Every structure is written in C-alpha cells, then in structure tokens.
Amino acid sequence: MEKIASFTVNHITLLRGVYVSRKDVTPSGDVITTFDVRMTEPNRQPPLSGRALHAIEHLAATYLRNHPVWRDKVIYWGPMGCLTGNYLLLSGDYESGDVVPLLCETFRFIADFEGEIPGATPRDCGNYSYMDLDGACDAARRYLHEVLECITPQQLVYPQ
C-alpha cells in the first residue's frame, strides 16, 4: 500500500510554520487547499496537550467561520492526531504566505481570549470538559510571537 502524501513529509527537519499540505480539485473543478499549521517541531519539541489543542480547535473554528472575508472559504479547521498542529482547509487555490495574515488574526484572537469557550457545553460538544483555555492561550501566544509574526521562507515550504 502506498504512503499517503502527509506521511512522506520529512518530519525530522520540519519546522514550526505554515505549509501547503495538498491541493485537491473537486469534480466540479474547485480547488481545495489544505494547510499544515505546525505549532511544534515534530519529535523534537513536546506536543501540545490534547486539552489545549481541543480549546484551540473550538476557538479557531469559531473565529474563522465568522471572519468577514474568509468565512465562506473555510471548509475545516481541526487538530492533527500527533498533537503538533492543525489542518486548515480552504476553498480556493492558495499558497502558504496567503494565509499568514489570517492566521495571525486567528492566533491573536485565541491568545487574548477570555470567557466561555464557544461550544464547550454538554449539548454542543462530545467531550466539552476536555479543554484547557490557559494552555490554549499560551500555545497560541508562543506560535504567534515565535513563528507567525517573524515567519521565514523556510517555514512556508515543506523540507525535502
């Protein structure tokens, strides 16, 4: 059986960054761009806690799906099983640099968020109590300041 594309990325040298993971074309000709929003260096830095990543998921998905410019292009935001980042799927043909300003806004929103996490109720979420808002804010703040606000070309294209 062939490896899927995401398992062919060199995780040994992968940095925190924003990468185009894939581009798919639907039968109607629409392009869907999948972004790898890598928040920790795989196998070299500790993964995010599941609780913090779950809170990030709720906050980012809510922010993105309410964004005045991007909301109609957002298909999906969700965590990676390896707990090192998230996937963002957008309708359209984009490059990594195209979404850095949007991700800066999103992670600033998460870093500064106070109050009740959207959708964190027994009615709205299958594991509503599995959240860590403080951990999410800290992780978002680090990613925003250490990666997004000073991103380099090396952090926008997968290593070979």
Image (tube, helix red, strand yellow):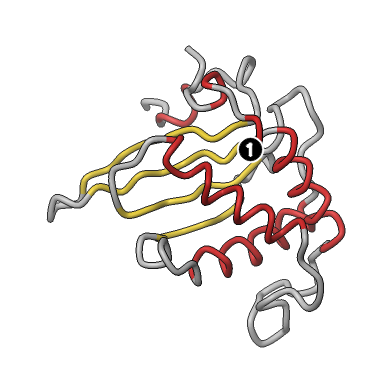
Horizontal arrangement in the rendering, residue 81 relative to residue 8 (left or right): right
* Above or below, 120 relative to 144: below
- In this rendering, the answer to whether 101 lies above or below 28 is above
Which one is nearer the viewer's eye here, 132 or 125? 132
Q: Residue at x 66, y 75 (%)?
A: 126
Determine the residue positioned at 52% across, 51% down.
Answer: 102
At which x and y percent is residue 117? 74, 74
Task: Report which quarter residue 28 is drawn in.
Answer: bottom left
For mark 1, does the 10 Å Cα neighbourhood hold few (<14), some (14 to 19), or many (20 or more) residues? Answer: many
Q: Quickly name the residue at label 1.
A: 148
Is 83 left, or right, of 9 in this rendering?
right
Element on which disc 1 rests: helix
Q: From the viewer's side, name the closer residue of 101 and 21.
A: 101
Number of numbered markers: 1
Q: Farthest residue in the right direction?
A: 134
Looking at the picture, does residue 83 appear above or below residue 67?
above
Q: Give the residue drawn at x 49%, y 32%.
A: 19
Q: Residue at x 49, y 67 (%)?
A: 67
Q: Give the residue furthest to the left.
A: 28
Above or below residue 20? Residue 12 is: above
Query: Which quarter shows the N terminus?
Result: top left
Q: Amino acid at mark 1?
A: Leu
Name the one closer to the observer, 11 or 152.
152
Q: Report the side of 113 relative to 98 (left or right).
A: right
> Looking at the picture, how far across and down is residue 23, in whole percent?
31, 39
Whole-percent x, y for residue 63 in the image: 57, 66
Q: Which residue, as the protein is rendered here, is positioned at the far bottom?
A: 123
Question: In the image, residue 153 lies at what x, y percent?
Answer: 52, 21
Q: State which quadrant residue 10 falls in.
A: top right
Q: Nearer the viewer, residue 114 or 78?
A: 114
